[in-house]
Amino acid sequence: AVQLVESGGGLVQPKESLKISCAASGFTFSNAAMYWVRQAPGKGLEWVARIRTKPNNYATYYADSVKGRFTISRDDSKSMVYLQMDNLKTEDTAMYYCTANFRYWGQGVMVTVSS
Amino acid sequence: DIVLTQSPALAVSLGQRATISCRASESVRSSMHWYQQKSGQQPKLLIYGASNLASGVPARFSGSGSGTDFTFTIDPVEADDIATYYCQQSRNDPLTFGSGTKLEIK
Protein backbone atom coordinates (compact mmCIF):
# COMPACT_ATOMS: atom_id res chain seq x y z
CA ALA A 1 0.00 0.00 0.00
CA VAL A 2 1.11 3.54 -0.75
CA GLN A 3 2.19 5.53 2.28
CA LEU A 4 3.49 9.05 2.78
CA VAL A 5 4.41 9.82 6.36
CA GLU A 6 5.45 13.32 7.39
CA SER A 7 7.47 14.10 10.51
CA GLY A 8 9.44 16.83 12.21
CA GLY A 9 6.76 19.41 12.87
CA GLY A 10 6.41 21.40 16.05
CA LEU A 11 6.40 24.80 17.72
CA VAL A 12 9.14 27.27 16.82
CA GLN A 13 9.69 30.96 17.34
CA PRO A 14 9.72 33.52 14.52
CA LYS A 15 13.01 33.67 12.58
CA GLU A 16 13.91 30.14 13.65
CA SER A 17 14.40 27.16 11.33
CA LEU A 18 12.75 23.76 11.05
CA LYS A 19 13.16 20.80 8.71
CA ILE A 20 10.24 18.51 8.02
CA SER A 21 10.49 15.15 6.31
CA CYS A 22 8.28 12.81 4.35
CA ALA A 23 8.92 9.07 4.03
CA ALA A 24 7.39 7.40 0.98
CA SER A 25 6.67 3.74 0.27
CA GLY A 26 4.52 1.56 -1.97
CA PHE A 27 5.29 3.27 -5.28
CA THR A 28 8.31 4.08 -7.45
CA PHE A 29 9.43 7.18 -5.59
CA SER A 30 12.21 8.09 -8.02
CA ASN A 31 9.65 8.47 -10.84
CA ALA A 32 7.40 10.88 -8.94
CA ALA A 33 7.50 14.65 -8.75
CA MET A 34 7.09 15.56 -5.09
CA TYR A 35 5.31 18.54 -3.64
CA TRP A 36 4.66 20.26 -0.34
CA VAL A 37 1.22 21.83 0.15
CA ARG A 38 0.16 23.66 3.30
CA GLN A 39 -3.10 24.63 4.93
CA ALA A 40 -3.33 27.32 7.58
CA PRO A 41 -5.89 26.65 10.31
CA GLY A 42 -9.40 27.05 8.90
CA LYS A 43 -8.07 28.10 5.49
CA GLY A 44 -7.66 26.59 2.04
CA LEU A 45 -4.82 24.75 0.34
CA GLU A 46 -1.64 26.50 -0.77
CA TRP A 47 1.07 24.95 -2.91
CA VAL A 48 4.51 25.57 -1.34
CA ALA A 49 7.25 23.76 -3.27
CA ARG A 50 7.92 21.17 -5.97
CA ILE A 51 10.88 19.00 -6.86
CA ARG A 52 11.08 17.11 -10.11
CA THR A 53 12.80 13.81 -10.86
CA LYS A 54 16.42 12.98 -11.73
CA PRO A 55 15.82 13.04 -15.53
CA ASN A 56 14.55 16.61 -14.97
CA ASN A 57 17.68 17.49 -12.97
CA TYR A 58 15.78 17.60 -9.69
CA ALA A 59 14.51 21.06 -10.67
CA THR A 60 12.82 22.94 -7.84
CA TYR A 61 10.06 25.53 -7.77
CA TYR A 62 8.63 27.63 -4.94
CA ALA A 63 5.66 29.80 -4.13
CA ASP A 64 6.58 33.46 -3.89
CA SER A 65 5.56 33.46 -0.23
CA VAL A 66 8.42 31.07 0.67
CA LYS A 67 11.01 31.70 -2.04
CA GLY A 68 14.43 32.35 -0.54
CA ARG A 69 13.40 30.93 2.85
CA PHE A 70 12.35 27.33 2.13
CA THR A 71 14.33 24.59 0.36
CA ILE A 72 12.88 21.35 -0.94
CA SER A 73 15.13 18.34 -1.47
CA ARG A 74 14.84 14.61 -2.00
CA ASP A 75 16.85 11.44 -1.44
CA ASP A 76 15.73 8.80 -3.90
CA SER A 77 17.89 6.16 -2.20
CA LYS A 78 15.82 6.59 0.96
CA SER A 79 12.49 7.53 -0.70
CA MET A 80 12.46 10.72 1.33
CA VAL A 81 11.55 14.31 0.59
CA TYR A 82 12.40 17.22 2.86
CA LEU A 83 11.44 20.83 3.40
CA GLN A 84 14.01 23.03 5.10
CA MET A 85 12.24 26.11 6.43
CA ASP A 86 14.37 29.07 7.49
CA ASN A 87 13.47 32.51 8.83
CA LEU A 88 10.02 31.26 9.74
CA LYS A 89 7.18 33.73 10.09
CA THR A 90 3.94 33.51 12.03
CA GLU A 91 2.07 33.27 8.71
CA ASP A 92 3.89 29.99 7.98
CA THR A 93 1.79 28.34 10.70
CA ALA A 94 -0.03 25.52 8.93
CA MET A 95 -0.50 21.82 8.38
CA TYR A 96 2.11 20.75 5.84
CA TYR A 97 1.28 17.89 3.48
CA CYS A 98 3.64 16.06 1.17
CA THR A 99 2.14 14.67 -2.00
CA ALA A 100 3.38 12.58 -4.89
CA ASN A 101 2.07 14.05 -8.14
CA PHE A 102 -1.00 15.12 -6.12
CA ARG A 103 -2.16 11.52 -6.42
CA TYR A 104 -0.93 10.30 -3.04
CA TRP A 105 -1.01 12.45 0.09
CA GLY A 106 0.42 12.15 3.56
CA GLN A 107 -1.60 12.81 6.69
CA GLY A 108 0.23 16.08 7.30
CA VAL A 109 2.49 17.56 9.96
CA MET A 110 1.68 20.68 11.96
CA VAL A 111 4.12 23.58 12.06
CA THR A 112 3.37 26.40 14.50
CA VAL A 113 5.38 29.59 14.47
CA SER A 114 4.73 31.70 17.55
CA SER A 115 6.59 33.65 20.19
CA ASP B 1 -0.93 33.97 -11.01
CA ILE B 2 -4.03 32.13 -12.18
CA VAL B 3 -6.94 32.76 -9.81
CA LEU B 4 -9.55 30.03 -9.44
CA THR B 5 -12.99 31.12 -8.25
CA GLN B 6 -15.38 28.74 -6.49
CA SER B 7 -18.60 29.45 -4.66
CA PRO B 8 -18.07 29.03 -0.90
CA ALA B 9 -20.88 26.60 -0.08
CA LEU B 10 -23.57 24.39 -1.54
CA ALA B 11 -26.50 22.64 0.17
CA VAL B 12 -27.99 19.59 -1.52
CA SER B 13 -30.49 16.92 -0.50
CA LEU B 14 -29.39 13.30 -0.29
CA GLY B 15 -29.90 11.49 -3.59
CA GLN B 16 -29.85 14.70 -5.58
CA ARG B 17 -27.18 16.14 -7.85
CA ALA B 18 -24.50 18.54 -6.62
CA THR B 19 -22.75 20.77 -9.13
CA ILE B 20 -19.70 22.83 -8.20
CA SER B 21 -18.17 25.33 -10.57
CA CYS B 22 -14.62 26.62 -10.86
CA ARG B 23 -13.70 29.56 -13.06
CA ALA B 24 -10.08 30.30 -13.96
CA SER B 25 -8.81 33.84 -14.55
CA GLU B 26 -7.16 32.61 -17.75
CA SER B 27 -7.19 29.44 -19.79
CA VAL B 28 -5.74 26.34 -18.16
CA ARG B 29 -6.79 24.11 -21.09
CA SER B 30 -7.61 20.77 -19.43
CA SER B 31 -5.11 21.09 -16.59
CA MET B 32 -7.78 21.21 -13.89
CA HIS B 33 -8.09 18.77 -11.01
CA TRP B 34 -10.58 18.26 -8.19
CA TYR B 35 -9.98 17.19 -4.60
CA GLN B 36 -12.17 16.18 -1.70
CA GLN B 37 -11.13 17.08 1.82
CA LYS B 38 -13.11 15.76 4.75
CA SER B 39 -12.77 17.40 8.15
CA GLY B 40 -9.43 16.59 9.77
CA GLN B 41 -8.16 14.62 6.78
CA GLN B 42 -5.75 15.14 3.94
CA PRO B 43 -7.06 16.02 0.47
CA LYS B 44 -7.96 13.19 -1.90
CA LEU B 45 -7.67 13.39 -5.67
CA LEU B 46 -11.01 12.69 -7.36
CA ILE B 47 -10.71 14.07 -10.90
CA TYR B 48 -7.59 14.85 -12.93
CA GLY B 49 -7.24 16.44 -16.35
CA ALA B 50 -10.69 18.02 -16.02
CA SER B 51 -12.68 14.84 -16.61
CA ASN B 52 -10.67 11.74 -15.70
CA LEU B 53 -11.76 9.73 -12.66
CA ALA B 54 -8.92 8.90 -10.29
CA SER B 55 -8.34 5.27 -9.39
CA GLY B 56 -10.87 3.85 -6.96
CA VAL B 57 -13.19 6.86 -7.09
CA PRO B 58 -16.89 6.04 -7.54
CA ALA B 59 -18.51 6.90 -10.85
CA ARG B 60 -20.93 9.19 -8.96
CA PHE B 61 -18.18 11.79 -9.28
CA SER B 62 -17.48 13.46 -12.61
CA GLY B 63 -15.85 16.53 -14.07
CA SER B 64 -16.13 18.53 -17.26
CA GLY B 65 -14.93 21.70 -18.90
CA SER B 66 -11.89 23.22 -20.53
CA GLY B 67 -10.31 26.61 -20.87
CA THR B 68 -11.66 28.77 -18.06
CA ASP B 69 -14.93 27.12 -16.98
CA PHE B 70 -15.10 23.80 -15.18
CA THR B 71 -17.78 21.79 -13.44
CA PHE B 72 -17.58 19.06 -10.83
CA THR B 73 -20.66 16.89 -10.26
CA ILE B 74 -21.73 14.37 -7.64
CA ASP B 75 -24.81 12.39 -8.66
CA PRO B 76 -26.35 11.13 -6.52
CA VAL B 77 -25.08 12.78 -3.34
CA GLU B 78 -24.53 10.47 -0.39
CA ALA B 79 -24.09 11.35 3.29
CA ASP B 80 -20.40 10.40 3.11
CA ASP B 81 -19.81 13.17 0.55
CA ILE B 82 -19.92 15.90 3.19
CA ALA B 83 -16.58 17.65 2.63
CA THR B 84 -14.91 20.65 1.09
CA TYR B 85 -14.08 20.35 -2.59
CA TYR B 86 -11.15 22.18 -4.18
CA CYS B 87 -10.24 22.77 -7.80
CA GLN B 88 -6.56 23.14 -8.72
CA GLN B 89 -4.77 24.12 -11.91
CA SER B 90 -1.43 22.78 -13.07
CA ARG B 91 -1.21 24.71 -16.34
CA ASN B 92 1.07 27.45 -15.03
CA ASP B 93 3.37 28.05 -12.09
CA PRO B 94 2.57 28.85 -9.41
CA LEU B 95 0.14 25.97 -9.04
CA THR B 96 -3.02 27.39 -7.54
CA PHE B 97 -6.11 26.11 -5.75
CA GLY B 98 -9.60 27.47 -5.57
CA SER B 99 -10.79 28.59 -2.15
CA GLY B 100 -12.95 25.50 -1.78
CA THR B 101 -16.68 24.73 -1.82
CA LYS B 102 -18.18 23.26 1.33
CA LEU B 103 -20.85 20.70 0.55
CA GLU B 104 -23.65 20.53 3.07
CA ILE B 105 -26.69 18.29 3.24
CA LYS B 106 -30.12 19.93 3.36
Image: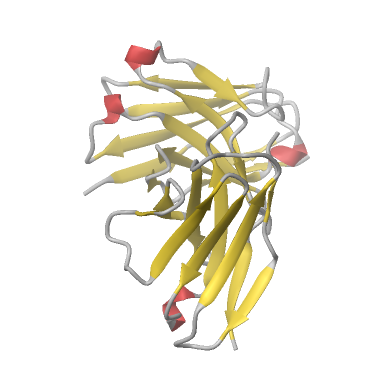
Q: Position of residue A57 (x, y in %)?
A: 40, 10
Residue A31, located in which quarter of the rendered image? top left
Q: Relative to the observer, which residue lies in front, B52 or B79?
A: B52
Q: Relative to the observer, which residue lies in front, B67 or B5?
A: B67
Q: Position of residue A65 (x, y in %)?
A: 72, 30
Q: Position of residue A73 (x, y in %)?
A: 46, 20
Q: Relative to the observer, which residue lies in front, B52 or B96?
A: B52
Residue A14, located in which quarter of the rendered image? top right
Residue visible at 27% across and 60% down in the picture: B56
Residue visible at 58% across and 44% down in the picture: B67
**Is residue A84 visible in this depiction of the protein?**
yes
Q: Relative to the observer, which residue lies in front, B46 or B50?
A: B50
Image quadrant holding the C terminus of chain B, namely: bottom right
Asked if B30 appears above or below B65 in the picture, the reply is above
- Tag count: 0
Asked if B93 appears above or below B96 in the picture, the reply is above
Q: Is residue B72 left or right of residue A52?
A: right
Q: Position of residue B94 (x, y in %)?
A: 62, 31
Q: Is residue B45 left or right of residue B92?
A: left
Image quadrant holding the N terminus of chain B, namely: top right
Residue A62, located in which quarter of the rendered image? top right
Residue visible at 41% across and 47% down in the picture: A106
Q: How is the image coloured?
A: secondary structure
Residue visible at 67% across and 54% down in the picture: B99
**Is residue A95 visible in this depiction of the protein?**
no
Asked if A95 appears above or below A7 in the picture, the reply is below
